[in-house]
Structures are given as C-alpha cells and as structure tokens.
Image: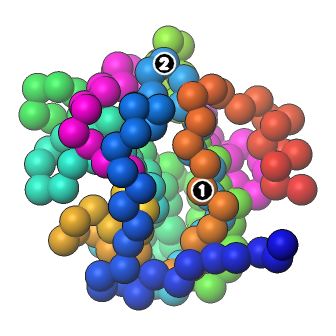
C-alpha cells in the first residue's frame, strides 16, 4: 500500500472515531500524527478525545499560531470546569511543510514531552490526572462546530504507553 492522507478544508471536515473504551487512556498517553497545515485558523484540533459543546476532554492536541509560526497546544479538563494546558514555544511549524508530531503525557510522573520529526523539542512538568469521560468521542480535524483544521493529516495513533525517544525516532524514519 501507498501513503494516504486526508485534506481537511478548515470549515466542516472532520472524523468521528467513536467512543471505544480503549481510547480513554489512563496514566500513559502517546499521540502521533503527520501534519501539513495550509494556514492557521485560531486553534486547530488535530486529535482529541472530547465532547463537543462542553468543557470536557480526556485529551486534546491543537495547532495554534503564535503570530509567526505554529505551536502545539495539549490540554485536558481538570474535572472542575477548567483546563490543564500546555503550549509549546519552539516547534516553529510553518504552513505547507510536513511534520511528524509525537506528544507523550506521563500522568504518573506529571510530564509532557513534544517531538518534531523524530527529535525531542520540549519537555516539562504538567501536573494533572487524565480524566476518562465515557461520553467523549475521538475527533480528528474539528471539535464539533469549533476549531477546524485547514490542511493535510495522516498516520494518527493513540497509544496507552509512553514512546521512548528511540521509538519516536524509528517511527519517523
């Protein structure tokens, strides 16, 4: 088989992958995908286990512009109507370029790590517990009526483990 990708139009394209219990991750989370954005439109949901129209999410990964280039925004709800969030500052993603993105969250060690094209870019503490809302669904490309993605994506993975730097590098190659 060849390489395939989906081109999201920044308006109404998205994928609803359902709410299988295996997607409600506890303790260790790895999100992986390839992205090539056409433009930045506010927040762009890349992938998330979320509930549309409600401040509730097991986990979400967005792309967002910092005014110059693109950064990643990882978040999950804190169970009290608020959010536990983190945003990269050195991803420096430009439109029209393919990027291999991996984000890991270790709920036990309270640590988030970001990788771009096989290399670790940022790592820091992020204290919180991943929720497991039974009514959340895995969405790609848009969260209901909000945060549509304008660009191409492929190769999504949601894993209940933490990839090592070696695993990330091997998957990129």
Q: Secondary structure at mark 1?
A: strand
Q: Is residue 24 left or right of residue 112?
A: left
In the depicted structure, whether residue 18 falls above or below residue 12: above
Point out the image quarter for the C terminus: bottom right
Point out the image quarter for the N terminus: bottom right
Q: Residues in magenta?
A: 113-138
Q: Quickly name the residue at label 1.
A: 156
Q: Secondary structure at mark 2?
A: loop
> Residue 102 in the image: x percent, y percent?
64, 47
Dot placed on the residue nearer the N-terminal end, 2 or 1: 2
Q: Quickly name the residue at label 2.
A: 27
Residue 153 drawn in magenta? no
In front of the other: 97 or 51: 51
The residues tagged by marks 2 and 1 sit, at their Cα atoms, a distance apart of 20 Å
Q: Residue at x 50, y 12 (%)?
A: 108
Q: Mark yes or no: residue 42 visible.
A: yes
In the depicted structure, whether residue 97 falls above or below residue 142: below
**Dot 1 surroundings within 10 Å: few (below 14), some, or many (20 or more)?**
some
């Amino acid at each position: 088989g060849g390489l395939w990708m989906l081109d999201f139009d920044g308006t109404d394209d998205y994928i609803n992958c359902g709410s299988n219990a295996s997607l409600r991750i506890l303790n260790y989370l790895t999100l992986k995908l390839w992205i090539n954005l056409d433009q930045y439109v506010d927040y762009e949901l890349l992938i998330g286990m979320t509930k549309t129209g409600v401040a509730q999410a097991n986990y979400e990964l967005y792309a967002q512009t910092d005014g110059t280039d693109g950064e990643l925004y990882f978040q999950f709800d804190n169970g009290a109507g608020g959010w536990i969030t983190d945003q990269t500052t050195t991803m420096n993603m430009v439109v029209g370029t393919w990027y291999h993105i991996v984000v890991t969250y270790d709920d036990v060690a309270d640590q988030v790590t970001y990788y771009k094209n096989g290399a670790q870019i940022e790592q820091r503490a992020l204290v919180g517990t991943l929720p497991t809302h039974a009514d959340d669904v895995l969405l790609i490309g848009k969260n209901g009526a909000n945060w549509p993605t304008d660009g191409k994506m492929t190769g999504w993975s949601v894993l209940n483990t933490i990839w090592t730097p070696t695993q990330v590098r091997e998957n990129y190659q």
